[in-house]
Amino acid sequence: MRLILLGPPGSGKGTQAQRLVQRYGIVQLSTGEMLRAAVAAQTPVGIKAQHIMASGGLVPDEIVVGIISDRLEQPDAAKGFILDGFPRTVPQAEALDELLKKKQIKLDAVIELRVNESVLLQRVETRIAEMRARGEEVRADDTPEVLTRRLASYRSQTEPLIHYYSERRKLLTVDGMMTIEHVTREIDRILSAIGAAEAKASSKAAAAKRTANRSNKGAKKAAKPVAGRASKSVGKAARASKKGAKAARKAGKPVSRGAKKAVRKPAAGSRARVAGKTRKAAKKVTKRPAKA
Ligand code: ADP
C-alpha cells in the first residue's frame, strides 16, 4: 500500500498514519518528523530548516524532495509507505511523480482529511496541553500564532494538491470531523475497496494474459499448416502473435483500456479464430484415437 495523507495541521494525519502503519505493516514517512530530527541533530539540513519551521514557513522543495528520495531508497519502504506532510506544494508533487516513475512505484491513493478550520486551533491547543501533561517537549511551531501561519501556507501552497490529485483520479476524501475511530474505519473501508478493485483488475489481467498466451501458442501452431499455402497468411499470423505478446505484456500491468480492448478483440488479427480452430482441431485429433 502506497499512500499520501493530505490535510491541514491538526487534521489528524499523524494519528491516522500511525494506525495505518500498524494495520498494513508499512512505514510512515513524515517530512515534519524527519526535519525535526535533523534540527535536533543540527545537521546542515536541520540548521537550514530550523528557523523556517519555527516561523511556520515551508522548507525549500529541493531539501524535502531530497530527503524523501533518499528515504524511499531504504529497504523498509519497499513494502509500502504513507507519506505524511509530503508533498506540500505542487512542485513537490511533480517531483514525487518523477521519483515514483523512475523507481517504478505506483501510488495507490491520496487520502484527504477534510476538517473545518474552526476546530484546528482547538485541536492544536489540546495537543499542546496533552504533551505538557505527559512531560513531553512541545514543538516550537505549536503556538496559536505560528499555527495561523501554517494554516495560511496550507491554504495557499498545499490545498492546490487536492485539485492536482483529483484530476489524476487519486484523491479520496474522508470527513476528518468524525471521531478518530470513525475516521480510521472510513479509511479502512476505502482502502479495502481499493484493494478489492485492484484484486479484481489483476485477476482480469491474469485471465487476459492467459488468453493472450493461449492465442499466441495457437497462432504459432496455426502458422505451420498455412505456410505451404500462402506466405501472406504466415506474415499475418506472425504479426498477430506479436500483437498477442504485446497484449499479454499490457495485461500484466494494471488493466488499461487499451489492454482490455487488445484482449477483447484479438480476432482483429484473425489470431484468435485461427487459434480457436486449431484448438478444436487438436481436441478432435486427440479425441478420435481415444474413441477408437
Ligand atoms: P503539521 O502538523 O503542521 O502538518 P509537520 O510536522 O508535517 O506539521 O511539519 C512541520 C514543519 O516542517 C512545517 O510547518 C514545515 O515548516 C516543515 N515541513 C514539513 N514537511 C514539509 C514539506 N513537505 N515541505 C516544506 N516544509 C515542510
Image: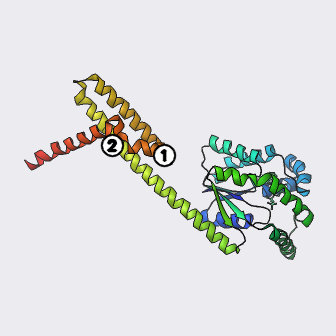
Give the CA distance from mark 2 to mark 1.
Answer: 21 Å
Residue picked out by circle 2 = 214
Whether residue 159 is situated above or below residue 246 in the rendered picture: below
The crowding category of the residue bearing disc 2, from other C-alpha atoms within 10 Å (few below 14, some 14 to 19, many at least 20), is: some
Q: Residue lying at the far left in this picture: please name it.
A: 292
Residue picked out by circle 1 = 257
Nearer the observer, 104 or 246: 246
Amino acid type, callout 2: Arg
Q: Give the x, y percent position of residue 103.
A: 63, 43
Which colour style is shown?
A: rainbow
Question: At 84% from the left edge and 69% from the top edge, which residue is drawn?
Answer: 124
Question: At 67% from the left edge and 74% from the top edge, which residue is drawn?
Answer: 181
Amino acid type, callout 1: Arg
Q: Give the x, y percent position of residue 72.
A: 68, 49
Of the numbered discs 2 and 1, the one sitting upstream in the chain is 2
On residue 104, the disc is none
Question: Is the CB of the residue bearing disc 2 within 8 angstroms of ligand 1?
Answer: no
Nearer the observer, 175 or 292: 175
Residue 262 as seen in the image, left or right of residue 96: left
Question: At 70% from the left edge and 75% from the top edge, which residue is drawn?
Answer: 179
* Tag 1 secondary structure: helix
The crowding category of the residue bearing disc 1, from other C-alpha atoms within 10 Å (few below 14, some 14 to 19, many at least 20), is: few
Nearer the observer, 287 or 187: 187
Whether residue 134 is situated above or below residue 58 in the rendered picture: below
Label 2–label 1 contact, CB within 8 A: no
Mark 2 vs mark 1, foreground winner is 1
Q: Give the x, y percent position of residue 95.
A: 72, 43
Q: Give the x, y percent position of residue 258.
A: 47, 42
Residue 257 as seen in the image, left or right of residue 214: right
Whether residue 140 is visible here, answered yes or no, is no
